[in-house]
Image (tube, rainbow, N blue to C red):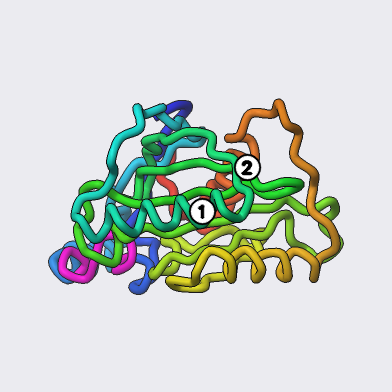
Amino acid sequence: MGGVSRRLNLAALTDDELQRLVGPERAVSLLPELSLARLDRRALPGPLVSETLAPQPLEDRAWGATPEQSRAIASLHADLLAAGAAPLGTYYLPGVSEVRHLRAYRLEPDSTAGLRWSETPETADTGWPFVQVLTWLRDRASGFACVLTSSARQPYAPALSEEIDMHLHPDCPVPDLLAAHRAHVLRHGRGQKLQADADWTRPWQAMHALNVAAWDRRGLLLPE
């Protein structure tokens, strides 16, 4: 991981966030320790959260932990290309979520997309491939900084920053997802145009910074 890393305080998560983060079985096994930590008002250290994204480039290959997952990845990739997305490489993205494989794309004129999956999923749902689309807004008159639209099956955990207009459309086909994302953006006005030579990680890093700040305000991150 790049930058400073801090641990997530599992005792400060809601029960739903904990289940989505570690899975139902592990959440149940943590209940006794979690209950004591909450009763004593002490932290229960969890995964590391880096203040800076550190995507690690990967050589492209046939991805997928199962044949079904491989077909889903290939299909989503083909759909993104058909929609005019420009591929920007495949990366391993350390982070809180176990969905750490990312194929990045640029969507002109103002959006960036990511195809996410896990090569070592704990459950079928957590590792199943999904697409997320991100657009930063020209102004924050609506109270939001950016719009994120995702076809993930599970809500994000911990919950994302209140400055992110988040829309979840589980298993939504790529064309419909992109149309929905465009409609969500238009409700706020216009998105910021992407610069062709800009680092593709900038929009994602900026969103990550919003989340880290929000988690810090909630007391989800332990002191350095």
**Quarter-wise, where is residue 197 in the image?**
top right
In what element is the residue under mark 2?
strand
Position of residue 4 in the picture relative to residue 147 (left or right): left
**Magenta segment: does it hold 95?**
no
Q: Are marks 1 and 2 in contact (CB under 8 Å)?
A: no
**Magenta segment: does it hold 21?**
yes
Judge the density around disc 2: few (<14), some (14-19), many (≥20) Cα neighbours within 10 Å.
many
In what element is the residue under mark 1?
helix
What residue lies at 42% left-to-right and 59% top-to-bottom?
130
Residue nearer the viewer, 9 or 49: 49
* Circle 1 residue: 215
Position of residue 174 in the picture relative to residue 108 (left or right): left
Could you tell me what secondary structure mostly forms the magenta stretch?
helix
What residue lies at 43% left-to-right and 71% top-to-bottom?
171
Residue 224 visible, this orientation: no
Of mark 1 and mark 2, the one earlier in the sequence is: 2
Judge the density around disc 1: few (<14), some (14-19), many (≥20) Cα neighbours within 10 Å.
many
**Quarter-wise, where is residue 30 in the image?**
bottom left
What residue lies at 45% left-to-right and 50% top-to-bottom?
77
Q: Is residue 29 above or below residue 91?
A: below
Percent position (x, y) of residue 20?
Answer: 33, 66
- Give the amino acid at mark 2: Arg
Residue nearer the viewer, 218 or 62: 62
Of the 4 image quadrants, the one containing the C terminus is top left
Percent position (x, y) of residue 29?
Answer: 13, 66
Q: Nearer the viewer, mark 1 or mark 2?
A: 2
Mark drawn on residue 106: 2
Looking at the rendering, the stretch of residues picked out in magenta corresponds to 18-27
- Give the amino acid at mark 1: Trp
Percent position (x, y) of residue 154?
Answer: 39, 69
Count of labels in the image:
2
